[in-house]
Image (spheres, helix red, strand yellow):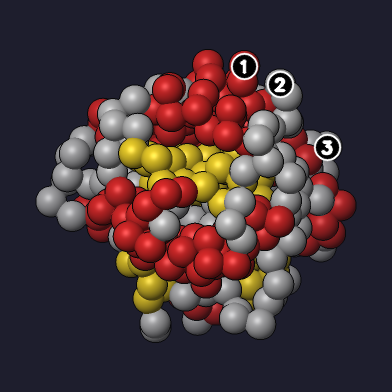
């Protein structure tokens, strides 16, 4: 299966958009070679602002730029983009619905070597709780490309969460991206798996395993967590015997909370795959951490079997 790096795709797409729209400005917190905004900096240094290790100042500065008609993209590790600059995001950007795009890179456990201080397991919950904020979690590089273009057109605050590692392509090239819309990736009749980020590919792997056991799994990519079309979420759950949510994020405040709230009262049993109420840790590689936290196709398959039985 073809893989792409979300950060690389993001950097290339931002550069392409910058060539077409002179109002795009990019702000960085001393991580340009990691977030890949260095590509934009090389071609448009006059529209690139290196703010140093100061996410709060960067975010306030972006708010000011947006008031002059600029489309401001701020960039840092997700744990800092969402956490260190929370007050500025809330007070300066979201209350006034300013046109600032916040990109949280190396999200979840994907920065496997740096441990809990650099791993964002709660950023989606923080951003979802802020009124007026749009929250997006792309499944692969293809969706990052479509998503980055769409949020450039969209007027208002957006938080987009990116993985650090190469991820398999799961989103069709010819599929449009629409903010708020969940997408059916694979159809099935027994179980529905709502997933986002890297867990979409894990859900597809689980669906293939389950098919060999005569269990039919439907996989839905919920890359837009706020807003989301609730009617579509309900439609995808129609007729199934069980519901699974799968996310590389805390089970508190993320996809599991979203889906169970929308489907409350449905009577369909639910199993949630995600990070328990704990921080990340260092690992030798990314897969080691995903296994340690139960974020695997095998765990999804096991949950499906339990729901069916």
Residue extending furthest toward the left: 284
Vertical position of residue 204 compared to residue 55: above or below: below
Question: What is the crowding at mark 3: few (fewer than 14 residues within 10 Å), some, or many (at least 20)?
Answer: few
Residue 265: image tag: 3
Vertical position of residue 2 compared to residue 142: above or below: below
Disc number lying in front (3 or 1): 1
Question: Measuring 18% from the left and 55% from the top, which residue is drawn there?
Answer: 285
Residue 95: image tag: 2
Can you tell which quarter of the image residue 183 is in? bottom right
Task: Identify residue for label 1.
Answer: 91
Give the image location of residue 287, x and y in percent.
26, 57
- Closer to the chain start, of discs 3 and 2, is 2
Inter-mark Cα distance, 2 to 1: 6 Å
Marks counted in the figure total 3
Give the image location of residue 185, x and y in percent.
63, 72
Q: Nearer the viewer, residue 175 or 253?
A: 175
Question: What is the crowding at mark 1: few (fewer than 14 residues within 10 Å), some, or many (at least 20)?
Answer: few
Question: Measuring 39% from the left and 83% from the top, which residue is drawn there?
Answer: 1
Residue 48: image tag: none
Inter-mark Cα distance, 3 to 1: 36 Å
| Callout 2 secondary element | loop
Give the image location of residue 255, x and y in percent.
60, 42
Give the image location of residue 121, x and y in percent.
41, 35
Vertical position of residue 307 compared to residue 255: above or below: below
Q: Are marks 3 and 1 in contact (CB under 8 Å)?
A: no
Q: Are marks 2 and 1 in contact (CB under 8 Å)?
A: yes
| Callout 1 secondary element | helix
């Amino acid at each position: 299966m073809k893989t792409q790096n979300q950060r690389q795709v993001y950097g290339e797409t931002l550069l392409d958009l910058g060539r077409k729209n002179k109002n795009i400005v990019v702000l960085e917190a001393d991580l340009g070679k990691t977030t890949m905004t260095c590509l934009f900096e090389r071609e448009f240094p006059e529209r690139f602002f290196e703010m140093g290790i100061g996410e709060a100042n960067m975010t306030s500065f972006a708010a000011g730029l947006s008031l002059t008609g600029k489309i401001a993209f701020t960039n840092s590790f997700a744990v800092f983009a969402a956490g260190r600059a929370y007050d500025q995001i809330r007070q300066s950007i979201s209350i006034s619905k300013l046109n600032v795009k916040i990109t949280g890179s190396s999200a979840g456990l994907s920065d496997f070597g740096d441990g809990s201080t650099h791993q964002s397991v709660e950023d989606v919950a923080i951003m979802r709780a802020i009124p007026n904020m749009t929250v997006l979690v792309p499944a692969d590089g293809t969706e990052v490309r479509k998503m980055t273009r769409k949020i450039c057109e969209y007027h208002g605050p957006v938080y987009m969460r990116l993985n650090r590692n190469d991820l398999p392509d799961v989103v069709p090239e010819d599929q449009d991206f629409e903010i708020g819309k969940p997408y059916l990736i694979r159809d099935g009749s027994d179980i529905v798996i709502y997933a986002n980020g890297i867990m979409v590919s894990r859900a597809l792997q689980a669906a293939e395993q389950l098919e060999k056991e005569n269990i039919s799994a439907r996989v839905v990519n919920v890359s837009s967590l706020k807003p989301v079309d609730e009617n579509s979420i309900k439609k995808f759950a129609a007729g199934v015997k069980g519901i699974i949510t799968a996310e590389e994020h805390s089970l508190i405040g993320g996809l599991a909370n979203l889906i169970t709230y929308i489907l409350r009262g449905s009577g369909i049993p639910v199993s949630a795959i995600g990070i328990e109420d704990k921080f990340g840790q260092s690992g030798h590689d990314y897969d080691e951490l995903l296994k340690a936290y139960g974020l695997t196709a095998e765990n999804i398959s096991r949950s499906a079997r339990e729901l069916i039985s």
